[in-house]
Amino acid sequence: MVILLIGKQGQVGYELQRSLATLGDVIATGRDELDLTDCAAIEALVSSVKPNLIVNTAAYTAVDKAESEQDLAYAINADAVGVLANQAKQYVIPLIHYSTDYVFNGQSEQAWQEDGTLGPINVYGESKLAGEQAIQQSGCQHLILRTSWVYGTRGQNFLLTMRRLAKDKDSLSVVADQIGAPTWSRHIADATAHIVAQSLKAESSAFWSSHSGVYHLAASGEGSWYDFAAQIFDDLSEQGISVATLSQTTTEAYPTPAKRPLYSAMNTDKLFTTFGIRLPEWKHSVALALAELK
């Protein structure tokens, strides 16, 4: 099996190079090998690799910068995705793509279902939704895996930022009225590999045809950014590390260029029912990730 992995330098892409390695020949590309704003280059890559599966983790994820770089956000999150989807359709290649909880407006009192009303409130969310729609309109066999608040042990993310600030600052305020599910990139990659392994045990065409659609892939449980930070600080304290004093603030008191959904926790029952996968409770995963950084 030849797997074309796009976005190898990202948090999920990095982990997927490991988790997919036992399932096939992984051809991984990053920004140095592929310019996602060059549609012809994307087409040429798919044509030359001739993969049995495309896994796209690449995305423009700078939520605030997207407000002023709308064209670039759409080029990577929508236009490039549409080209990949059309190539997947043309060559009958299944496509796995990652989306976001930010396709929802945040105005809910219970975890979002896959078929919940979509209404992104920032450019990043709008561009990611456009990417979802491009895949669906292409008619290719696909899995759109929506995830949330992704962190890992490398790159730039909330966990690593809080770990650094916990040591460097005397006190810190974190937003407490935005609710979601912090999700470890490793668990996203492992869950993806588990799905791919299931496809290899089944009749491939039938598997992808019957399972194509949108799934929520996020950690169990929910919490605020403050809860996330507090868990990180607690785990660091258990390691014997002195940490800053942590306090709560509000979204209104901490304005940003892009609006954030206040409640974006997602229901993951469909993923469990279909593939038998449910990610661990988010607090447990944070502790595991931090333990690797000792």
Image (cartoon, rainbow, N blue to C red):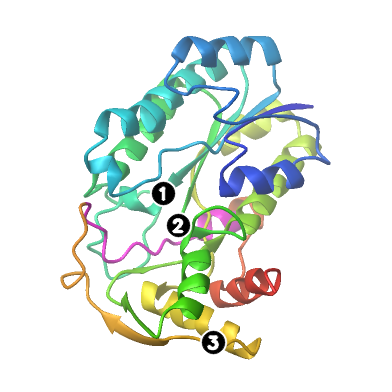
Q: Is residue 48 left or right of residue 152?
A: right
- Residue 100 is labelled as 1
Residue 101 in percent (x, y) is at 38, 53
On the question of residue 290 being in view, the answer is: yes
Q: Nearer the viewer, mark 3 or mark 1?
A: 3
Q: Image point 70% across, 15% down: which residue? A: 49
For marks 2 and 3, the one nearer the N-term is 2
Q: Quadrant of the C terminus?
A: bottom right
* Dot 1: element: strand
Outermost residue toward the right in this view = 22
For marks 3 and 1, the one nearer the N-term is 1
- Crowding around mark 3 (Cα neighbors within 10 Å: few <14, some 14 to 19, many 20+) is some
Q: Image point 67% across, 10% down: which residue? A: 48
Q: Is residue 223 left or right of residue 25?
A: left
- Residue 16 is labelled as none
Q: Quadrant of the N terminus?
A: top right
Q: Which residue is mark 2?
A: 148
- Residue 234 is labelled as 3
Q: Main secondary structure of the magenta part?
A: loop
The residue segment tinted magenta is 258-273
Residue 41 in percent (x, y) is at 52, 13
* Dot 3: element: helix
Q: Is residue 164 above or below residue 259?
A: below
